[in-house]
Image (cartoon, grey):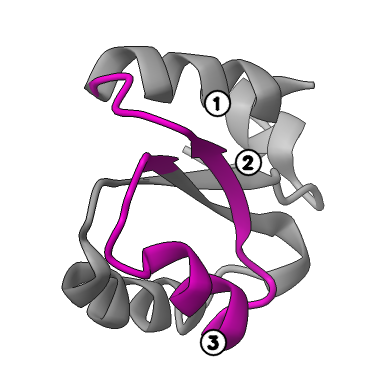
Amino acid sequence: MNSESHPKTTKLQGHIPTVSILVLNLNGLHHLEACLPSLEAQTYPRDRVEIVVVDNGSTDGSLAFVREHHPRVRIVAYPSNRGFASAYNNVADLCRT
């Protein structure tokens, strides 16, 4: 099937969608040290990717690490643990706007 006969391919030709990658964190500094460099090294166009660390009240220096070593990463920090679904859903709504 060529792109002329496939509606999705035709619609996306020449357009690269913007994506948001949400990383939920709670005292996971040791995970962020490996995760964030890997995400930043991906091959998707850099100007079309937003990496967001969603922090659930970490006390292990996670946020300071992200701010210092990954300044392009957006941080949404909650003062306490909101749980998995609540934190993700709230930030996903922010990323849609």
Depth check, mark 3 against mark 1: the one in front is 3
In this picture, which residue range is highlighted in magenta?
55-83
Q: Is residue 81 magenta?
A: yes
Q: CA distance from mark 1 to mark 2?
A: 35 Å
Name the residue: 40% across, 24% down.
Answer: 88
The first of marks 1 and 2 along the sequence is 2
User: Which residue is disc 3 drawn over?
Assistant: 69
User: Which residue is disc 1 drawn over?
Assistant: 91
User: Which residue is disc 2 drawn over?
Assistant: 3
Depth check: give the residue in front, 50 or 18: 50
Image position of 58 (left or right of 41): left
Kind of residue at badge 1 = Val
Kind of residue at badge 3 = His
Q: How many C-alpha atoms fall within 10 Å of the one at disc 3: few (<14), some, or many (≥20)?
A: few
Q: Is residue 67 magenta?
A: yes
Q: Position of residue 44 (x, y in %)?
A: 57, 68
**Secondary structure type for disc 2:** loop
Number of on-image labels: 3
Q: CA distance from mark 3 to mark 2?
A: 42 Å
Name the residue: 69% across, 71% down.
Answer: 72
